[in-house]
Image (tube, rainbow, N blue to C red):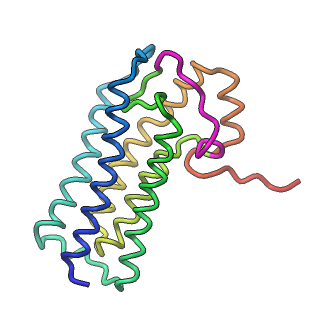
Amino acid sequence: MPERRYKLLFVITHMLFIIVRLVYGQRYKRSHATTQINRVTTQEKVLLGGVAVSYFVPNGFWLFSNRLKFAQLGLRPWMRLSGFFISLASIGFFAWVHKTLGDNWSPTLEIRNQHELIEDGPYATVRHPMYTAIYGYYIGLIPLMNNWFPGLMALLGFTALYVGRVDHEEQLMREQFGAAYEEYAQRTGRLLPRWQPRE
């Protein structure tokens, strides 16, 4: 398959990801719920900026130049297509997470009036499935692009955000929901379902 077709597949996955975010971003803006607690910090703004730079800049070089040939992987076509389907499945999971959250989702650390503790759908076994979906999307890009550099940079930028934010996010939920969140955290994993041995 010509390289331009793989680039088209990348653009398709990227646009689908953006469309999902835009749809629920507009829903967030139209929501009549008001913010009760907002914990947006300068650190979070910097980390969000880092995510954008680490994603768009390397991907731009891969799309529009030949400067990343040093990081090519030499993968077979079926391996590259598997990366496309991994990213596609992750976007589907991303949309499911958004739908399950509904008006409880916000782009920053905040609690809204009538905020609910969601424990069904993807949240039945994982506390932060949206992060899981984004990790899956980035991981799929590595074989799709046949290049480790853009995917690695995106993963590093996103991991910095995850590490800098997840503890604050969980603390906010504990303050809001108390014992109910503690019980929920005991039976769920952060990114993957918690392994529980059979009795």
Residue in the picture at 59% in, 52% down: 192
The spot of residue 92 in percent (x, y) is 45, 55
- The residue lying at 37 percent from left, 37 percent from top is 24
Relative to the observer, which residue lies in front, 116 or 148?
Answer: 116
Judge left or right: residue 17 versus residue 53: right
Q: Residue at x 31, y 69 (%)?
A: 148
Residue furthest toward the left?
65
**In the image, residue 197 lies at what x, y percent?**
80, 55
Residue 34, x across and y down, in percent? 41, 15
Q: Image height check: is 93 above or below 175?
A: below
Say if 31 sits above or below 136 in the image.
above
Residue in front for this viewpoint, 87 or 182: 87
Residue 117 in magenta stretch? yes
Residue shown at the point (65%, 46%) measured from the top left: 125
From the viewer's perspective, is 102 left or right of 179? left
Question: Does residue 149 appear to the left or right of 183 in the view shown?
Answer: left
Tell me: residue 169, above or below residue 35: below
State the quadrant of the N terminus.
Answer: bottom left
Q: Is residue 104 left or right of residue 7?
A: right
Residue 52 vertical placement versus 61 (above, below): above
User: Would you say residue 9 sits in the magenta stretch?
Assistant: no
Farthest right residue in view: 199
Quadrant position of residue 23: top left
Q: Main secondary structure of the magenta part?
A: loop
Q: Could you tell me residue 99's position as x and y percent?
A: 48, 40
Q: In the picture, residue 36 is in which quadrant? A: top left
Q: Which residues are magenta?
A: 112-125
